Amino acid sequence: MPLTNDIETQLGLIANWTHVSFKKNLVSSLSRILDDEEGVEDVLEGFYRGTAITGSGTGAPGLLCLTDRRLLFVSNGSTSATPENIAFESLNAVETKKGFSAVQVVLQQRGGTTMLTATGNGIQVQSFVDRLQRKLNDVPSAHPEGNGDDSDSVLPRPIQTGEDRLANLKFLYSEAKKTYLTINDYKQFNGEPLFLQQLTDDLMYITYRAIGSDGEVPEESRLFVSMVLMPLKQNIIKDRELIIDLFRYDSPPLRHRKAILKNWDLFSNEIRKAGTGQNSKLLRSLQYLHLYDSRHSTSHFDKMASTFYNYAQVVIKADGTVNDQETARIRQLRELIYGENGTHAAGSNEGDEKSEGAQQRVQFAPAEEEEETLEQVMEKINSLIGMEKVKAQIATFVNLLKVHKEREKRGLPVTPFSKHAVFYGPPGTGKTTIARYIGKVYKCLGMLEKGHCIETDRAGLVAGYVGQTAMKVDQVVQEAMDGVLFIDEAYTLSPRDAGKDFGQEAIDTLLKRMEDFRDRLVVIVAGYPDEMQDFIDSNPGLKSRFSRFFYFDHYTPKDLLRILNVFIHNSSFTITPQARRELLNIFTYFYERRDRSFGNGRFVRNLFEMTVEKQANRISGISPLTDEILCSITKADVPTAQDFQH
């Protein structure tokens, strides 16, 4: 039985632990449950419905713990309660499902399906699931033979028949395509022109460590590596048509296999150069992403680290066999990618970004955000598409704030006013974007120290039992302190005909904190007009604190087309005049038939994605494919109204 202090030390290193309630009870339970030398790697709080533990409603409250040996759920209640133990070998699949106000982690086991309804935000949940998936990838028996289609498994089955061999080639092709597309998504990350090159260099170094310096590299590994590197190292490939044709299909064209393998000698030489003469190497692209995440509360490191680690495993396991030496390489690569104890070295200490050697260790250091002036912020607001009424309201509001500050400065009497606001409007109309700019406006005028914006909803504020809701609200308020707290679909905190609901506890706690920190916290609530009006009217405290209202109307068809032009430009497409007219017709058709759930900006994204799909279908049979053909969108590519009914 491990010591309580040891467990607390382990948990203190886990990011998700900071968001957990009832820590004392859970630490006590874990000290009783964990085996000697068993380490906790990640935790996720929520409501669990399993085989032995079910609870009521969404399930029993507690903590899902990922250790280095198993997965277990510990209830928040009695410290003597029996946990639910889940062996890695019993897990067939893990997936997430986003509901209206929460994210569910679904565990498909041999004995049935169990589920955790997580109370954390999407980043916390995805971080936990990614770590669990990596753990399962290290357990061959977690994907037993005969479990169905193994095309998504990281460990292909040993190749014995021609049919198995073909299935394995399809698996390698799918993994190569997925790896390339993920890396290529970062080719202009944060405006760094050389970042894609750094990602490619790091990928080649990982390849060097994966294949080793001795022995023959299996054909399957050579094929997989070549498929990934061909589009990333185009400068050394002579067959340009092969690169263009490579990832056009859902499965690998057999006619390309020999042509792809012919490039191995070129890549082998590059891989040796990437790794020769270096006993150790920092993956600079990952260090850069780690520092970027720490400054912007994003999760790019997790995404790319998972891609690198998955790639390394496929390189090693491509032929369907793994020996002891290769197993050791996998462990070493995991430490290289994630750092010792699963924590990446870059930025692991709080002050590491500011240390003297930080710039030497990381090739690309995220630039410090420049202080924006009020004029610059207002210029960005005014450059947004549409929202003319909102822009005018903001301009008037800014003038009021400036006069208010000037009167304060001169010691003149001022009329108290509320900085909190209500955003009325349908989804996809720019409410979140404006909330972020409002925070910057307050900062520029000296009314908020930071001016950052923390976004949340009911799931981020309300728990399923007495006591925890206030804790969740306090946690979110603490994160938003000296900035803006933006609550989307705020009316769900006080649903109609809900009877006794923990949302009222969230409202009461929030009102108290708004009063306690009235000079350090701005709250903006948003949602549909009718529901938001009922929400504000339902509580005298809300009505007195929210006295400023902004109405966000639907974008017009011309505005929607302007938004689409941004997508087209960013993706290097061109569009014919006939296609532009047809797109305007589509926007007009749906705008005239819109209801309150019309997606606005989200509808534009869906239309753009459908257009790109139709364009791909149209040109797939054309040979040769020129840049003009690849980048041109014509009238034939524009979806019809009927296409949205499927």
Image (spheres, rainbow, N blue to C red):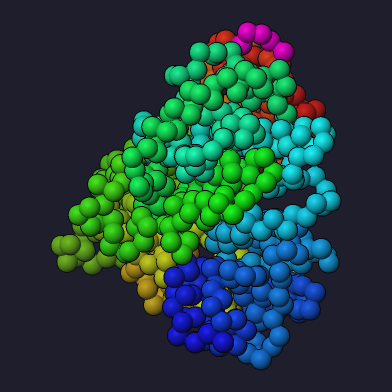
**Quarter of the figure that contains the C terminus:** top right
Residue 186 position in % (x across, y down): 47, 36
Is residue 307 shown to the viewer in this render? no
Residue 44 position in % (x across, y down): 59, 69
Q: Is residue 622 magenta?
A: yes
Is most of the magenta stretch helix, strand or loop? loop
Is residue 270 shown to the viewer in this render? yes
408 or 302, which lies in front?
A: 302
Magenta residues, start to end: 621-625
11 or 173, which lies in front?
A: 173
Please determine whether, in this image, residue 345 is positioned above or below residue 514.
above
209 or 610, which lies in front?
A: 209
272 or 603, which lies in front?
A: 272
Residue drawn at x 73%, y 63% is: 89
Residue drawn at x 46%, y 82% is: 6
Residue drawn at x 44%, y 70% is: 13
Give left or right: position of 220 versus 167.
Answer: left
Residue farthest to the top, as pictured: 624
Residue 321 position in % (x across, y down): 67, 46
Residue 76 position in % (x across, y down): 63, 83
Give left or right: position of 82 versus 178.
Answer: right
State the image quarter where residue 406 is shown.
bottom left
Please determine whether, in this image, residue 276 is positioned above or below residue 41.
above
Residue drawn at x 76%, y 40% is: 159
Q: Is residue 411 magenta?
A: no
Tally of numbered tags: 0
